[in-house]
Image: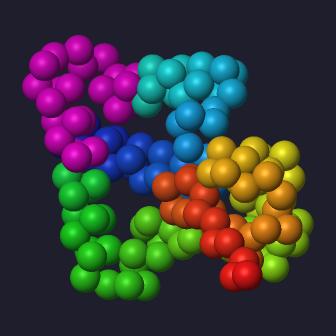
Amino acid sequence: MEILIRATVIYWFMWLVMRGTGKRSLAELTPLEMIMIVVMGDFVQQAVTQEDMSITGAALAVSVFVGWTLISDAVARRSPSVAGVVRGEPVVVLRRGEPLDRRLVEERLSLEDLKEAARLQGYGDLAQLEYGILETDGEFSFIAKQK
C-alpha cells in the first residue's frame, strides 16, 4: 500500500514540475536538461520503491503512473476546464508579425527560438505571419498573413 501512495504523490509532483517547466518539446532540450531528466528518473524510482526491489513493487509503481495518466486523460476528455489544466492551452506568441515578449518570457522561449521555428516551417521573416502559436505539445503553428 505504501508504494501506491508514494507513486501517487510522485506522479502528481512530476506533473506539477513538467507543467511548470513549459512546453518545450523533447527535441529542444539541452544536453544538461536531458541528463537532469535521466537523473530525476533515478530519484523518482528511489522515492517510490525505497528498498523494495521486487518485480511486484516495480509493477505497482508503473501501474499507478499509468492509471493516473488514464484517469486524468478520461476526465480531461469529459471536461474542457479540466482539459485546460491537465493538457494545457495553446499560447499565442506572435500577433501580426510582432513577437509577444511577455508570452515568450512566460514560456521560457527566446526570440531566436521563435525565428528558428518559423524558418523550419518555411517563413524567413516573422513579418510574413499573422499568428504564431505555441501548441500544448511544444510545437509551433504559424498562420501566414493574407495577401
Which range is magenta?
45-66
Locate residue 31 relative to residue 108 in the image: left or right: left
- Residue 83 appears in view: yes
At horizontal 24% and vertical 36% (from top left) the residue drawn is 61
| Location of residue 101 (image quadrant) | bottom right
| Camera-nearest residue between 9 and 124 | 124
- In the picture, the quarter occupied by the C terminus is bottom right
Give percent across and percent down for residue 122: 67, 51
Locate residue 105 relative to residue 51 in the image: left or right: right
- Residue 17 appears in view: no
| Location of residue 31 (image quadrant) | top right
Q: Does the magenta stretch include residue 59?
A: yes
| Camera-nearest residue between 93 and 33 | 93
| Camera-nearest residue between 47 and 129 | 129
Q: Is residue 59 above or below residue 2?
A: above
Locate residue 130 relative to residue 5 in the image: left or right: right
| Location of residue 107 (image quadrant) | bottom right
- In the picture, the quarter occupied by the N terminus is top left
- Give the main secondary structure, helix, strand or loop, of the magenta stretch: helix
| Camera-nearest residue between 146 and 93 | 146
Locate residue 118 relative to residue 104 in the image: left or right: left
Q: Does the magenta stretch include residue 83?
A: no
